[in-house]
Image: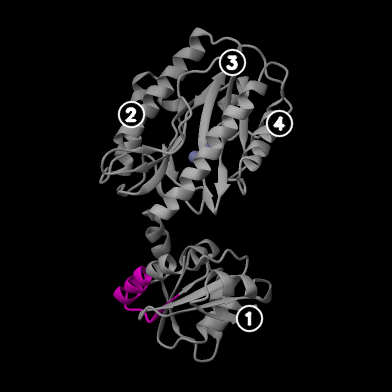
Amino acid sequence: MPEIHEARRARLAGLVAARGADAALITRLVNVRYLTGLASSNAALLVRADGTAVLATDGRYAGTATRVCPELECVIDRATAGVLAGRVTGRLAFEAHEVTVEARDALAGEPDAPELVPLGHAVEELRMVKDEEEIVLLAEACAITDQAFDAVLPTIGPGVAEREIAIALDRAMVDLGADRPAFATIVASGPNGAIPHHVPSERAIERGDLVTMDFGALRGGYHADMTRTVAIGEAGAWEREIYELVAAAQAAGVAAARPDAVTKEVDAAARGVIEAAGHGDDFPHGLGHGVGLEIHEAPLMGYDKTGKLMDRVPITVEPGVYVAGRGGVRIEDTLVVRADGPELLTKTTKDLLVI
Ligand code: ZN
Ligand code: ZN
C-alpha cells in the first residue's frame, strides 16, 4: 500500500512545515511502521517539509524494506537515527517522548548537527483517525476475538483453571487467523475478578463464580480488545445486580461516543450510571482508549482526559465494578466512532451468560 503511506507522510510533512522545521526524524518504531509499512526493531524515517522521505534500517530488514516500501530511498546502516540526522541542516523536529537523553545528546553532539526541536505527538495524533483499510484489519481482529470466545465458552466450567482458559483463548485466536494475542490475556474468576488486571492463576473456577475474560487478537498489526464476564452455573442476586449495572454503564458510554464528543464527557456518561448506584469508588480506571497499531493509543478516555472524538476513531468502552474480596464485572467493546452512530466491531452478546 505505498499510496496510503505516501499520503500519511504528506500529512506529516504539512505539520513539519507548519512548525517551522525543515524535517522530522521519526524514531518511534510504531510510527515508522505507520508511515512506511515497515515493521522493524531498528528503523528510523526522515520526512522533510517538502514531502520527500528517507528510511534507514539495518541489514536484517533490507530485503523487507525494498519489498514493503519500494518507493522510498532506503539507507542500510545500524545507526539509523544518526545517519538520517546527518542529512539535515537547519531545524530537525524529533520525537522527544521516545528519544533517550543519551541518544539526543549523541545527535546534538555531531559536527554540523541540526538544531533539534520537539515534534510532539504529531504522528500519534495523525494515527487517531483511521483509514478504512485500517478499520478493515481491526474488524478482522475483532471477528477473530468473537469467534475465539464462542470456541472456548463450552470448555469453561467448574474445575477449569484461569490459566487453562487464557491459554485456550490464545490458541483459539491463533488458530482462527490471529498473528498472535494482542496483549496478555486476562482471566479473573471469583474474588480475583476484583483485580482489573489480574494475571491468570491456577485457581480453579467454582460454581457461582463470575469470570472476567479480557483478550483480543492481533491482525496485520491491529489490536482487538474485548472483555466479557460470564457466570458459572448460576448467578446470585448480587452478581446479577453488578452485571446489569456495568452493562447499563457500558451502553451509556457507547451511546455517548459520537464525533465531537468530549472524551471526559463520554467517560462521565458511563461513570455517572455507576456513581448513581453507589459504586463510584469501585470503578478506578478510565472508560477506554484508542486502539490501532498499539493496544493503548490516543485518545485516552478518562475523567481527567482532554480531547474530542472524531469520525473514524476506534476506541474501547470498558467500564467495570470491582469489589475487593467479592469479585467484579467488566464489559468492553471495540467500536468505531461514526457520524451515524458507533459501529461495534466486537459483537459478542452483552446479555449475562450463565454457563
Ligand atoms: Zn481489554
Ligand atoms: Zn481495553
Q: Main secondary structure of the magenta part?
A: helix
Q: Closer to the N terminus: mark 3 or mark 2?
A: 2
Q: Is residue 208 above or below residue 40?
A: above
Label 2 packing within 10 angstroms: few (<14), some (14-19), many (20+): many
Residue type for callout 4? Arg
Under circle 2, the secondary element is: helix
Residue assigned mark 3: 355
Give whichever of 58, 23 is nearer the camera: 58
User: 263 and 42: which one is in front?
Assistant: 42
Label 1, secondary structure: give it.
loop
Which residue is the site of mark 1? 77
x and y, in percent, of residue 188 in the image: 61, 27
The amino acid type, in three-letter code, at marker 2 is Ala
Residue 2 in the magenta stretch? The answer is no
* Residue 201 in the figure: left or right of residue 153: right
Q: What is the C-alpha distance between the residues marked 3 and 1?
A: 56 Å
For disc 4, the marked residue is 163
- How far apart marks 4 and 3 lie (CA) works out to 18 Å
x, y percentage for residue 221?
54, 54
User: Is residue 119 at least partly visible in the picture?
Assistant: no
Mark 4, Cα crowd under 10 Å, few <14 / some 14-19 / many 20+, is some
Residue 164, relative to residue 87: is it above or below? above
Q: Which mark is residue 22?
A: none
Quick one: label 4 or label 1, which is nearer the N terminus?
Answer: 1
Mark 2 highlights which residue? 252
Cα distance between the residues tagged 3 and 2 = 26 Å
Question: Which structural element holds mark 3?
Answer: loop
Mark 4 or mark 3, which is nearer to you?
Answer: 3
Labels 4 and 2: the sequence-earlier one: 4
Q: Are marks 4 and 3 in contact (CB under 8 Å)?
A: no
Name which of mark 3 and mark 1 comes first in the sequence: 1
